[in-house]
Image (cartoon, helix red, strand yellow):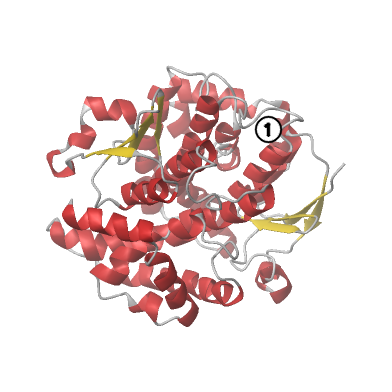
Amino acid sequence: MAAPVKVYGPTLSTAVSRVLACLIEKDVDFQLIPINMSKGEHKKPDFIKMQPFGQVPAFQDESISLFESRAICRYICDKYADKGNKELYGTNPLAKASIDQWLEAEGQSFNPPSGALVFQLAFAPRMKIPQDEGLIKQNQEKLGKVLDVYEKRLGESRFLAGDEFSLADLSHLPNTQYLVAGTDRGELFTSRKNVGRWWSEISSRESWKKVVQMQKSG
Amino acid sequence: MSTSTSLVIICLHEKEVDFELVPVDLFAGEQKQPHFLAKNPFGQVPVLEDGDLTLFESRAISAYIAEKFKETGYDLLRHQNLQEAALVKVWMEVESQQFHPAIAPIVYQFYVVPLKGVSPDQAIIDDNLEKLGKVLDIYEARLSSTKYLAGDFYSLADLHHLPYTCYLMKTTAASVINERPHVKAWWEDISSRPVSKKAAEGMTFGEKCTLKIKALLL
């Protein structure tokens, strides 16, 4: 029996929760090693050795040491292709290409504005950092335009890459969870009929419910 | 030539794949017309058509090409070695999430803004050069222990840095690369590959860009 993989980071981190959701979907045993960011543990030499940018998560699978949550997710899906949800990263090259396309759209178009809003609206207040109204407005507009594209897509397709829930949808869970459940801007998602339907469906997956539970108790 | 389109072309050449380049007139706004939006709802170039598959997002396209044609041309993904392949994925995400957000606004100020008759915004350039410098400090440390980003082998992770850096090197911001000896040596190496040099010849901003690619299979 292989040793469980290790994930280093706090459950509240969007990038960490992205990896946890993937591991649970793939039914891969893991050990979560908490990193106390308010104490600067992510900037200490031992951590920097694993993640030179001093960010979470870091990941280890026996002798393989990785970082960047989307790379970790792709690795998990490739290495453990036969475990858990086999459709998560597609079972043929065309399905995989479509999933990669929407995973890139998440990383390039969705994440910057939604991530900025999560920071401004959910994290800045906790960290006693003043909010930047200009940045909030700007990113809300940007995110709205991206969600308009999603609204059209999700009127044609049940999930972003096709008929099956995939890594592309999963990658959107962390930021959206904060915006819908933790701020007053959830209507960006819920006021759009298809996006609202999609959010409801992907967020009620058992794997995501487990991650949210971990965030609440962690 | 758009940076994203150049990226895909470089990948196609490294894999020795024949393709047809179909012009899309960016200056006339062709990418926002319904016939193009049907291919990429985000209205961006490039788009790949390969048989029944239509794909957008240059990084998804390059990954698809590198995977599909893994048995021909240069081995960009290290698919036969799980550890090496995983590190290629990591450094591809580093380019996407750390390098790109810092370099893109700089290139935009130097090249795109003047096309609209406006002077480059020095504050934006300086701000992003500082960010890019911090990212490149980490690259400097990495490249003093490995010849290329993912290991001692050129990979898709290095390739993804070519287009934007090529444009940066023609500006005064080139110092951010030249000041760091290992980064500079790495740049000189990857940009002097025959395919890289050939692509650089085609990278002159402001010309009508050829953007939609049809890959013809042999």
| Residue B215 seen in the figure | yes
Residue B119 against residue A40 in the figure, above or below: below
- In the picture, the quarter occupied by the C terminus of chain B is top right
- x then y, percent, for residue B115: 59, 60
Number of residues whose C-alpha sits closer than 10 Å to that of mark 1, classed few (under 14), some (14–19) or many (20 or more) = many
Say which residue appears at 71% left-offset and 59% top-offset. B54
Relative to the observer, which residue lies in front, A1 or B37? A1
Relative to the observer, which residue lies in front, A30 or A185? A30
Residue A199 against residue A167 in the figure, above or below: below
- x then y, percent, for residue B182: 46, 21
Horizontal placement of A32 versus B65: left or right?
A: left
- x then y, percent, for residue B72: 77, 30
Residue A25 against residue A45 in the figure, above or below: below
Say which residue appears at 61% left-offset and 32% top-offset. B77
The residue at the far front in this view is A1
Relative to the observer, which residue lies in front, A195 or B179? A195
Relative to the observer, which residue lies in front, B89 or A139? B89
Horizontal placement of A44 versus A90: left or right?
A: left
Which chain letter goes with mark 1?
B
Horizontal placement of B191 versus A180: left or right?
A: right
Horizontal placement of B44 versus A3: left or right?
A: right
Query: What amino acid is at disc 1?
Result: Ser
Q: How many marks?
A: 1
The residue at the far right in this view is B218
Residue A153 lies in quadrant: bottom right
The residue under label 1 is B196
- x then y, percent, for residue B75: 67, 28
